[in-house]
Amino acid sequence: EGVVVYESLPAPGPPFVSYVTLPGGSCFGNFQCCLSRAEARRDAAKVALINSLFNELPSRRITKEFIMESVQEAV
């Protein structure tokens, strides 16, 4: 119910890899080479946002509230 999950692959140093799972079950990973875990989370959130904006399934649409929560969690 509206839970966004961030997961990171264990890594001793960069590049860091992070995944975000949206409430509808869609999962997205970061695209860029990220030098910090926070940067990887933000990048994964951006990928999720872009994909969800173009996704036609209403249950996977991103609301303003979701964006605000995702940005806060990724910071």
Image (tube, grey):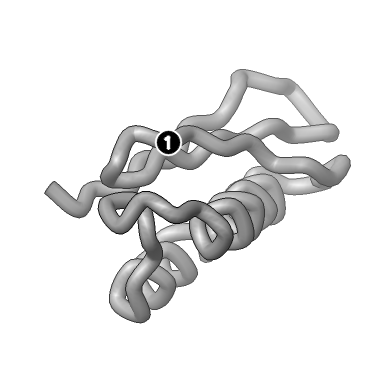
Question: In the depicted view, which residue is nearer to us: 52 or 74?
Answer: 52
Q: Is residue 52 above or below residue 26?
A: below
Q: Residue furthest front?
A: 56
Q: Nearer the viewer, residue 65 or 37?
A: 65
- Nearest the camera: 26 or 11? 26
Instruction: Answer left or right for 65 relative to 46.
Output: left
Q: Is residue 55 left or right of residue 13?
A: left
* 23 left or right of 17 in image: left
Residue 48's x, y, as percent?
A: 55, 51
Quarter-of-image position of residue 37: top right
* Local SS, label 1: loop
Residue 12: x, y in percent?
Answer: 74, 22
**Disc 1 designates what residue?**
26
Foreground of the two, 50 or 14: 50
- Residue under the image location 36 percent in, 80 percent down: 64
Which amino acid lies under the numbered mark 1 shown in the image of this protein?
Ser
Neighbor class of circle 1 (other Cα within 10 Å; few <14, some 14-19, many 20+) is: few
Percent across and percent down for residue 39 are 70, 54
Identity of the residue drawn at 29% across and 42% down: 24
